[in-house]
Amino acid sequence: MGVWTIQEAFEVGGLLHRVLEQYEPRQPQIELAVAIAEKMRAGGHLMAEGMTGVGKTLSYSIPAIRQSQLDSESSDHEEKVEDREYEGGEGEDFEEDSEEPSRVVIATANIALQEQLYFKDLPTLRRALPNNFNFALVKGRNNYLCKSQLDKFRLETASEAVPMGKDVSTVQLKDLYDVINSDEEAICKWSQETEFGDKSELEIEPRSETWRKFSVTAEECIGSECPYRKEVGCHAESARKALQFMDVIIVNYHMLFSAVKVQMETGKDIVLPPFKYLICDEGHKMPDIARAFFGWHISQAVMNQAVNMLRKVVSKAGTSDEEGEIVAARINAAHGGIKKFWDEVAEVFGDHKGQMRITRTDVVRGLALAQSLVDVADSLLDFSEFSVDGFSREEIRKKAGQLKRVMDHLRDAMELGDQNSVYFIERAGKNRWLNIVNRKLDVGDILWQNLFERTKSTVVTSATLAVDGDCSFLRKELGLAKCGEVLVGSPFNFREQACILLSDRAPDPKQDNYPVRVSVAMAEIIKQAGGRTLGLFTSYRVLHYVAEYIQEEMPDLNCLVQGTAPRRKLIEEFTADVGSVLLGTESFWTGIDVPGESLSCLVIDKIPFPSPANPVLAALSERAVEGGFWGISIPRAVLQFRQGVGRLIRRESDRGIIVVLDNRLVTKGYGSIFLNSLPRMKLAKSLRDNQITRWLEGEV
């Protein structure tokens, strides 16, 4: 293996330059790559911040691949399987050579970034770097065609297409096309020719309720009882097993945490093969994703599904009259108990708009329901000992197990049994069902003991890790006490390209007329900017007030508002129409990349402090040594604020201005923490004298 250096990869005429015609070295990108390479070589963990424009994916991918190859010099990784988008799921544990695997796992929170890595960055690096490597994008099991589900769909649908007296088991897929919808027909035809069974191969985008008929989640998979598991080949299992031949594996955080959880429960590497190096991109999102993943939620839908399955099983099992009466009584008791329980939860929840924290053990009363659902689970387990037409034994056992976990969670909620959790009630989903939710508070110990400590090196990276130049807030959140830090600046010249407008005369969010003042200011800003404005808001209420005002005052303006069209379509139209305006809330603070003139002015209505009504943040604030405001609210707001500001300057040719309509950045002592966390840029103090127009035209 020829040894190549980080410098050789990034320099003019180097490895990247040979395959990228427009490539130009960026010093911050090289600095970040060198720091990551050194940490991986020596071992240990690193918080690595690279601001917008640095090119973080290449900064971490190149040193990770290089170190993996250096570790594996004696291994032959040249053969390999064709690169595919592979799935992780439960099954047998992975077999490994006696030597420690040098595999790299890259985890992200964003589908767009996963696809950028898989379809663009890693293929580019495979062309550029001297030594070959293989990579895979891991998806959830439900992204793959399940052959058992396909069989079930065929048999359940056959009765509508088969002449009387014909055996439904002999029905061919072509016989069903007259009685199924177009999406189902497309999936059935594709199932006969696909090699990998990946939903992304389809030329259509099937509705979720349609695709569910042909797929299973990891929890629903019947495992070793499936006839396709070994005999013919399960698409998901084939993909999972191929991961052991991969050098780089791309996952989302949910899949990464699934691997952690299964390893904690079984002591085996089942979801992902062992890996030595871990990259956590968008690392600022990692703690909250972990809090949700390692928590749980109880829904009425899951309870009803289990009871309804028992009803179907009983109807097909051919039970005796006496046995049938006993089970029917259990089913009726469970249905009645479920309705009564959730009616009581709804009464407790009242007219709350968001979430209601549970702080007393007498708020959720479900002992009677728990017992009736235990009876249902026991009945399901009894039936799982026999063959029931249309249901496998493993399928019935899994539903019983799921129901018993629901019972454990219900008792936990009644007792408030975990001091490291917060419990609350919320409405969620399209149908606005009530859920009872548990979220973990401190996830640092879980992540350190079961993830970071098991790697030789973990790199947590993002454009926003630091608060006032210090990553200690996120280090503590993630449990990375023993961790280095590297913060590299932007390759853009913010002093020349960007201006921020702040004033003590800006609106005060505590005043009753705040929405009116913001609306008037927005109209003036848009006028001076000639459209070309992205407005980021912290509440839907103010967003809608401002949108109505702007549309009334400026009827000829193309004012694009969150919720009026899909997010991607709004961004595309905003980019294409240089004179338009785009207004959005939380989801628009991140992930928007609009270079050029269309986004010349960025308006932030107020500092994005988290809502004190959020149960998780309220509980974290109560535990914060520094106090909730300084220890939790300010660091979170700073990171969100930095994400919003990062929407403005995306290319070296961009020029723009940021307007913050919140006087607290100037009048409050904590304002300096926010400003010190931003790149240095020009400062304006008033909307007067056409300051925005003059800046954008280069007059000041």
Image: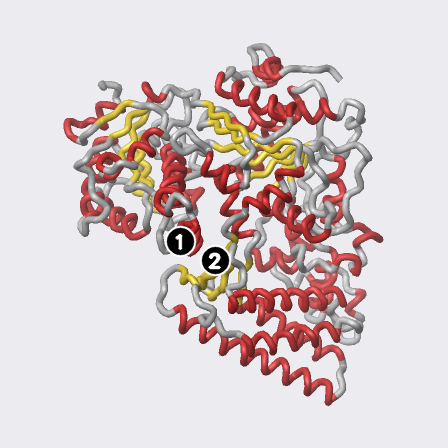
**Would you place residue 276 above or below residue 374 in this image?**
above
Q: Quadrant of the N terminus?
A: top right
Which element type, helix, strand or loop, lies under badge 2? strand
Residue position for label 1: 618
Badge 1 vs badge 2, beta-carbon distance below 8 Å: yes
Q: Give the side of residue 179 with respect to residue 623, left or right.
A: right
Residue in the image at 70% along x and 33% along y: 103
Quarter assignment of residue 650: top left
Residue located at (64% from left, 36% from top): 105
The amino acid type, in three-letter code, at marker 2 is Val
**Lower sequence index among marks 1 and 2:** 2
Colour pattern of the rendering: secondary structure
| Front-lying residue, 657 or 503 | 503
Is 265 or 66 nearer to us in this picture? 265
Using a 10 Å C-alpha cutoff, classify the residue at mark 2 as few (fewer than 14 neighbours), some (14 to 19) or many (20 or more): many
Name which residue lies at 58% across and 74% down: 370
Residue 442 in view in this figure: yes
Q: What is the spatial separation of the Cα atoms under label 1 and label 2, in whole angstroms?
A: 9 Å
The answer to whether residue 661 of the structure is visible from this angle is no
Left or right of residue 313, residue 74 in this image: right
In this rendering, is residue 36 above or below 170?
above
How far across and down, in percent of the image, does residue 373 sit?
61, 75
- Residue 138's place in the image compared with 594, above or below, is below
**Image side of residue 69 versus residue 585, left or right:** right
Looking at this view, name the residue that lies furthest to the bottom.
322
| Amino acid at the residue labelled 1 | Ala
Residue marked by disc 2: 422
Q: Residue furthest front?
A: 625
Where residue 374 appears, as percent x and y from the top left, is 64, 74
User: Regarding mark 1 in the picture, which secondary structure is present there?
Assistant: helix
Residue 239 x %, y %: 73, 44
